[in-house]
Image: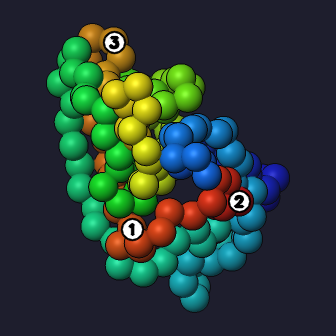
Amino acid sequence: MTDKPSLHYWHLFTDANGTSRQKRCAMGKFDLKPIQPGAAPQWQGEKSSGTMTTMVTVLPVGWIGDWHENPKPQWIIPLSGRWFVEAMDGTRAEMGPGELAFGGDQNCKMQDGKTGHRSGTVGDAPAVLMIVQLDEVDAPAPCAFS
């Protein structure tokens, strides 16, 4: 069997001063077990539970959104194309298929006309994103999904 995986993701969060920031984090708590009795073992890491809403969104070529907060704590998974997320602190992360982001920048304070983050497409193709919104009220701490 292969070595225990380690997956990286960008975690967008709000610091104590109300500024959005991004941090590169790693998930490494995986257990090799079957997903159900009788299935072959696979690496599994339970990261969230509870009520969630899943949607797919398509950002057109050249799309750049206004500054805003994520409506709820949410995972963003690019399915095709590339997109970027820019935090209030100036950190900009670009992502494509196979990369993960967690948006937890709720409760930011307006600074220099900015609150939360802005995002947009990169390149000459639309960005197709799967979004999994958690119905939790509070966003988890940076790198909480270890």
1 or 55, which lies in front? 55
Q: Which amino acid is tagged 1?
A: Leu
Which residue is labeled 1 in the image? 134
| Disc 1, SS | strand
| Disc 2, SS | loop
Which residue is labeled 2 in the image? 146
Which residue is labeled 3 in the image? 123
Instruction: Give the Cα separation between the discs numbered 3 and 1.
Output: 29 Å
Residue shown at 35% from the left, 73% from the top: 135
Residue shown at 31% from the left, 22% from the top: 121
Instruction: Give the Cα separation between the discs numbered 2 and 1.
Output: 17 Å
49 or 42, which lies in front? 49
Instruction: Give the Cα separation between the discs numbered 3 and 2.
Output: 31 Å
72 or 76, which lies in front? 72
> Percent from the top left, x then y, of residue 85?
43, 30
Vertical placement of 80 versus 29: above or below?
A: above
> Percent from the top left, x then y, of residue 92?
52, 24
Quarter of the image for residue 133 reads bottom left
| Of pointers 3 and 2, the one earlier in the residue sequence | 3
